[in-house]
Amino acid sequence: MNKKHRLSRSADFERAYRQGKSIAGRYAVLYYFNKSGEVGECGPRLGVSVSRKVGGAVVRNRVKRILKEVFRARQERLAPDYDYVIIARTGLAEYIDKNRFEDVSGMVEDLFRRADLIQEAD
């Protein structure tokens, strides 16, 4: 994932949590904040948060890599003027282990669809 499409500052995460909206699923929570009108706007940006409750460092990093890849594959269809934060819930690592990448991708895409953030192709 390109550096300009990442949320890195804690202030960006806080703004998404406090001023944004959220959609919760069984295995993840999606926070999204409309940043339209900001200087230096560069398309959709993603931040991923995975608690230690999800697993050890190897498991947490694997979950983050998979969530980032799902975002990267879908970012052309996402609303461009938003910051997104995905928070992994405790069962996500087991869900990833038991299911194919397409199933995990569909689960994340369902969160974006429920938030009405996916732009359908013409």
Image (cartoon, helix red, strand yellow):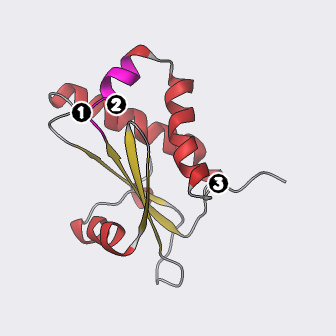
* C-alpha separation, residue under disc 1 versus residue under disc 3: 26 Å
- Is 30 displayed left or right of 60 in the figure? right
Q: Residue furthest top?
A: 98
* C-alpha separation, residue under disc 3 versus residue under disc 2: 22 Å
Q: Quadrant of residue 13?
A: bottom left
Q: Residue furthest right?
A: 122
Q: Residue at x 41, y 14 (%)?
A: 98
> Could you say whether the residue bearing mark 3 is in a helix, strand or loop?
loop
| Region of the chain picked out in magenta, as a range | 89-97
> Could you say whether the residue bearing mark 2 is in a helix, strand or loop?
helix
Of the numbered discs 3 and 2, the one sitting upstream in the chain is: 2
Q: Reply above or below: 27 against 35.
A: above
- Name the residue nearer the viewer: 20 or 45: 20
- Name the residue nearer the viewer: 38 or 19: 19
Is 92 included in the stretch rendered in magenta? yes
Question: Label 3, on which residue?
Answer: 118
Q: Badges 1 and 2: C-beta atoms under 8 Å apart?
A: no
Q: Residue at x 40, y 37 (%)?
A: 26
Of the numbered discs 1 and 3, the one sitting upstream in the chain is: 1
Q: Nearer the viewer, mark 3 or mark 2?
A: 2
Question: Label 2, on which residue?
Answer: 92
- Amino acid on which disc 3 is placed: Ile
Question: Label 1, on which residue?
Answer: 60
Q: Quadrant of the C terminus?
A: bottom right
